[in-house]
Image (cartoon, rainbow, N blue to C red):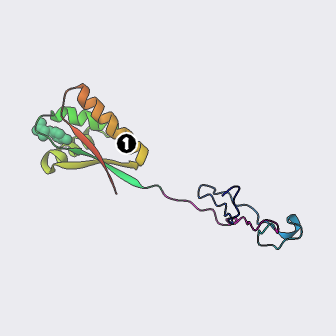
């Protein structure tokens, strides 16, 4: 918008800091609506802090016929911070149902988990698959 004659509205969704409105006293000769009285531009100020909840992603393990059960239990403990008992239940759920959830995370954390699990499985030459899906 800079350098054009088009009215510009500077409203940053990430800006959660409320700012005082532009008023006439700080805006000599202009009305109290943010118009600078000169170039036809205006600044809209947010009064209510606007927060956005991040999208969440399930991280899933897929069953296969070759990865040892103990290896899957270890993966779930190591990368998803589960107890041995919870990790065993998750592994058995995947073994019996074909797919199962290890945790729910924001995009970047989920992506990191998937990469860590896939790299670890490959390093140990197991075909274990880990994927993420938007909730
Ligand atoms: N089905 C595998 C076996 O019988 C065990 C297994 C469980 C593999 C979960 C992958 O995500 C998995 N050895």
Q: Residue at x 63, y 57 (%)?
A: 16
Farthest left residue in view: 65
Residue 133 visible, this orientation: yes
- Compared across the picture, whether 39 is left or right of 90 comes to right
Q: Residue at x 59, y 62 (%)?
A: 50
User: What residue would you read off at disc 1?
Assistant: 111
Q: Quadrant of the N terminus?
A: bottom right
Q: Quadrant of residue 36?
A: bottom right
Give the total of numbered labels. 1
Question: Can you give x and y, in whole percent of width and height, for residue 18 in the image?
Answer: 69, 61
Question: Can you give x and y, in whole percent of width and height, for residue 13 in the image?
Answer: 59, 58
Q: Quadrant of residue 128?
A: top left
Secondary-structure class at tag 1: helix
Q: In the image, ligand 1 is in what quadrant? A: top left
- Compared across the picture, whether 83 is left or right of 16 comes to left
Q: Residue at x 85, y 71 (%)?
A: 30
Position of residue 121 relative to residue 60, above or below, is: above
Q: Quadrant of the C terminus?
A: bottom left
Q: Which residues are magenta?
A: 37-53
User: Magenta stretch: residue 48 in it?
Assistant: yes
User: Magenta stretch: residue 92 in it?
Assistant: no
Question: Can you give x and y, in whole percent of width and height, for residue 119 in the image?
Answer: 29, 31
Query: Front-most of 92 and 7?
Result: 7
- Compared across the picture, whether 96 is left or right of 56 comes to left
What type of secondary structure mainly makes up the magenta span? loop
């Amino acid at each position: 918008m800079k350098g054009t004659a088009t009215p510009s509205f500077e409203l940053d969704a990430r800006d959660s800091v409320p700012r005082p409105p532009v008023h006439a006293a700080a805006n000599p000769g202009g009305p109290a609506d943010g118009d600078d009285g000169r170039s036809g531009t205006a600044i809209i100020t947010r009064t209510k802090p606007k927060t956005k909840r991040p999208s969440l992603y399930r991280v899933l393990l897929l069953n296969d016929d070759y990865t040892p059960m103990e290896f899957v239990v270890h993966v779930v403990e190591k990368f998803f911070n589960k107890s041995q008992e919870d990790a065993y239940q998750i592994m058995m759920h995947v073994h019996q149902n074909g797919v199962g959830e290890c945790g729910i995370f924001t995009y970047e954390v989920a992506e990191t988990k998937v990469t860590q699990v896939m790299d670890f499985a490959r390093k140990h030459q197991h075909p274990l698959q880990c994927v993420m899906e938007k909730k």
